[in-house]
Image (cartoon, rainbow, N blue to C red):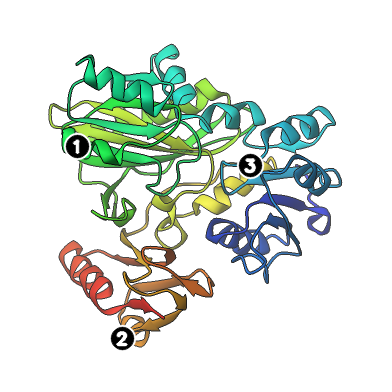
Amino acid sequence: MNSVETSKLELGILGGGQLGKMLIEAASDWNIRCHVLDPDPQASCSKLAHTFVNGSFADYDTVYQFGKNLDRLTIEIEHVNVAALHQLEKEGKQIFPQPAVLEIIQDKGKQKAFYEYNDLPTSNYQYVDSKEALIELLEEEKLSYPFVQKTCKAGYDGKGVAVIKSKDDIVSLLDGPCIIEDVVDIEKELSVIVARNRNGNTSCFPTVEMEFHPVANLVEFLLAPANISEAQEETAKQIAIDCINAFGMTGILAVEMFLTRNGEILINEVAPRPHNSGHHTIEANDVSQYQQLLRCLFDLPLGSTKAWQHAIMVNLLGEPGYSGLAKYEGLSDCLSLEGVHVHLYGKQITKPYRKMGHVTIIGDNIQAMREKASFVRERLRIIA
């Protein structure tokens, strides 16, 4: 764009959760009007969107009607009706990530086959079409313990994953088509967010490392940049670039990876949208993951991903044992600390381990930042 008439910039977003909320906040800097579709009338975006449509993003007619009067569409959750997006694309709508990319990423079996076909490093796996077929493989000793089971469809935020260590865990097997992966000897879990515009130009944010909650299987702590070697950093970024190029995707892709104890870096899975592992970029980087996505969507130059400071991100999860109207204990204590940035997602109802917000701590002294992160985790509690 040589000239931009910002009053005419509009974007449709399928999904109205916290990722959409932060995307709208970034879009407001450039006067981009955002229209949101979400099944929850109290979704995080419901009060921020230029227009908010209460409806299912999994329903063909609802998605088609929502998108037919918009020129550009994106997603903040993968589990949307792809058939409707294919039709809208045929009618000339600009949809990023492209429906063909979403179709692969929605199915973990297709994802793994895609990595294999494109020589992208990933752990060994096999496809199994049902729980019954999986039990049969175990009884015939054609599959050995331990292994990781992932349902092909609808997994999200730790759901749809089971770690099966022995016969005692068979009761935890998940229903439906799935993939079975080898248990990887993990040293660190990493993530790279890579952007690609329609001209095929790419740009990576620095690699981050993640620590997961042992019960909820959600990211609990994120350290940016990752404490890895320069060679490992370059390898992780190159894998991310190779991955988004293989998809031919426009937008941003979060590539979650395992760094094994023998030094391999393997793709775990990907998300074709803003991601939990990129929230810290709002405060810590020259452009945020949300601004970078908007640059891809509106044919604007990719921004610098330079990190100005170290960052630690803490997810704010609903306390176990509490469900109901959310109350925030310790918020004032945390806001009194220098370098501590609190983001609340506007969800009225808390549930155990529900993502309710995040806190980013920025600074130059890692030890002091870790102390603040521990303080936040212990002091800021979400109860009902």
| Residue 213 visible in this rendered orientation of the protein | yes
Residue drawn at 47 percent across, 77 percent down: 324
Q: Where is residue 135 in the image (x, y as percent from the top left)?
A: 30, 25
Q: Position of residue 283 (x, y in %)?
A: 43, 63
Under tag 1, what secondary structure? Answer: loop
Of the 4 image quadrants, the one containing the C terminus is bottom left
Label 3 amino acid? Val
Of the 4 image quadrants, the one containing the N terminus is top right
Tell me the CA gap for discs 2 and 1: 36 Å
> In which quarter of the view is residue 95 placed?
top right
The mark nearer the N terminus, 3 or 2, is 3
Viewer-nearest residue: 302 or 350? 350
Label 1 amino acid? Ser
Q: Crowding near pointer 2: few (<14 within 10 Å), some, many (20+)?
A: few
Residue drawn at 37 percent across, 66 percent down: 352
Residue at the disc numbered 3: 80
Tell me the CA gap for discs 3 and 1: 38 Å
Compared to residue 346, the image places residue 236 above or below, namely above
> In which quarter of the view is residue 327 placed?
bottom left
Residue at the disc numbered 2: 333
CB contact under 8 Å: marks 3 and 1: no
Give the numbered dot on residue 229. 1
Viewer-nearest residue: 5 or 188? 188
Q: Which of the two discs, 2 and 1, sits closer to the camera?
A: 2
The mark nearer the N terminus, 3 or 1, is 3
Q: Position of residue 238 (x, y in %)?
A: 37, 27
Under tag 3, what secondary structure? Answer: loop
